């Protein structure tokens, strides 16, 4: 297959995965930063280069890079042998819980879809981008990549074919994300989870997930905040995030509707409704992390748009 352009550049935004009980199912795209991927003709195979403020330490070996793995899966599936060079401009730091590995894979697949003229739908792009997660986490979960590709709020039903439901998130929905200076590898955060849950946890999880979807559909930010809390996922992962309980309590006291671990952590996400003072919430969360001897960057983010082509030559 021949390329249809000389080069294509795509961007994809960050995401908050899980929202508590919705492990590997829910994702919300947020404007907390983005990665850019440019694809052009190469000399042999897939050659990756990395640039950008967050590129340090990210492997350029395609087998070990999320964008590289996603491109390999896409090209193998479509019998594409054409050599390409790929530049990943990393804007999102890895290991923070905001879907950094997924943004590179999402942008890469969206760029390749255009570059090779494949005409894949967004839903068809997701499984290839999810293959990238194998490089980062060992499993091809798709919650982050789906949110980054579609924007807004996404629900993933894993399987063959994978099904994605995309819902626009309420305009009033905002999060304060507090990112402590601490790296938590997704594989370690997944290893912290139990292999099995009790019937009680299962029932509670089903109810919470249903409440989350209902709250998003009706725009009830207070109900959303309530529904994202208390998951077994956060209970186990909070052991990897010093100060989590104080950060959560501080956010609530400062006016947040509810708090969860963002993705695999260590970022903590607090839902803020239109009446809450986000600056006060952000300061409270930062101070609570500081009290746990962790430097922290906290900021307000809104729901982000899906991955898109920004340049084609
Ligand atoms: N759903 C994934 C997890 C997101 O929580 O492990 C992080 O890749």
Image (cartoon, helix red, strand yellow):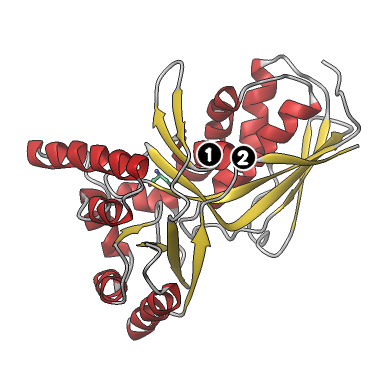
First in sequence: mark 2 vs mark 1: 2
Give the residue displayed 50% in from the left and 58% down from the top. Answer: 95
> Between marks 2 and 1, how big is the CA–CA gap?
7 Å
Res 3 quadrant in image: top right
Q: Secondary structure at mark 2?
A: helix
Residue of label 2: 105
Assess mark 2: CB under 8 A from ligand 1?
A: no
210 left or right, relative to 111: left
Give the residue displayed 52% in from the left and 33% down from the top. Answer: 130
Residue 66 pos. (x, y %): 60, 41
Residue 304 pos. (x, y %): 56, 50
1 left or right, relative to 271: right
In terms of image quarters, where does ligand 1 lie?
A: top left
186 left or right, relative to 246: right
Residue 191 pos. (x, y %): 32, 48
Give the residue displayed 43% in from the left and 66% down from the top. Answer: 176
8 left or right, relative to 207: right
Disc 2: CA contacts within 10 A as few (<14), some (14-19) or many (>=20): many
Q: Nearer the viewer, residue 71 or 211?
A: 211
Residue of label 1: 145
Q: Nearer the viewer, residue 129 or 61?
A: 129
Give the residue displayed 55% in from the left and 57% down from the top. Answer: 94
Q: Secondary structure at mark 1?
A: helix
Residue 98 pos. (x, y %): 49, 55
Location of the N terminus (image quadrant)? top right
* Pointers 2 and 1 in contact (C-beta within 8 Å): yes
């Amino acid at each position: 297959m021949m390329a249809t352009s000389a080069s294509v550049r795509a961007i994809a935004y960050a995401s908050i995965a899980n929202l508590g009980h919705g492990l590997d199912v829910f994702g919300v795209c947020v404007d907390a930063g983005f990665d850019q991927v440019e694809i052009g003709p190469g000399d042999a195979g897939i050659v990756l280069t990395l640039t950008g403020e967050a590129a340090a330490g990210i492997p350029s070996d395609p087998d070990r890079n999320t964008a590289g793995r996603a491109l390999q899966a896409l090209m193998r599936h479509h019998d594409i042998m054409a050599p390409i060079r790929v530049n990943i401009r990393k804007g999102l730091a890895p290991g923070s819980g905001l879907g950094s590995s997924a943004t590179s894979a999402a942008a890469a697949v969206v760029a390749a879809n255009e570059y090779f003229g494949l005409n894949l739908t967004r839903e068809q792009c997701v499984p290839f981008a999810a293959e990238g997660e194998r490089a980062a986490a060992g499993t091809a979960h798709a919650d982050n990549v789906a949110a980054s590709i579609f924007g807004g709020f996404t629900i993933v039903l894993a399987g063959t074919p994978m099904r994605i439901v995309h819902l626009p998130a309420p305009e009033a929905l905002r999060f304060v994300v507090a990112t402590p200076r601490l790296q938590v590898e997704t594989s370690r955060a997944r290893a912290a989870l139990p292999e099995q849950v009790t019937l009680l946890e299962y029932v509670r999880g089903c109810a919470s997930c249903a409440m989350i979807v209902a709250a998003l559909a009706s725009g009830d930010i207070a109900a959303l905040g309530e529904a994202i809390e208390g998951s077994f996922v956060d209970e186990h992962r909070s052991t990897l995030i010093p100060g989590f309980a104080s950060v959560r309590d501080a956010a609530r006291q400062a006016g947040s509707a509810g708090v969860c671990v963002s993705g695999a952590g260590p970022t903590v996400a607090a839902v803020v409704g239109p009446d809450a003072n986000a600056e006060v919430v952000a300061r409270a969360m930062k101070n609570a992390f500081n009290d746990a001897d962790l430097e922290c960057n906290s900021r307000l983010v809104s729901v982000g748009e899906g991955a898109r082509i920004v340049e084609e030559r």
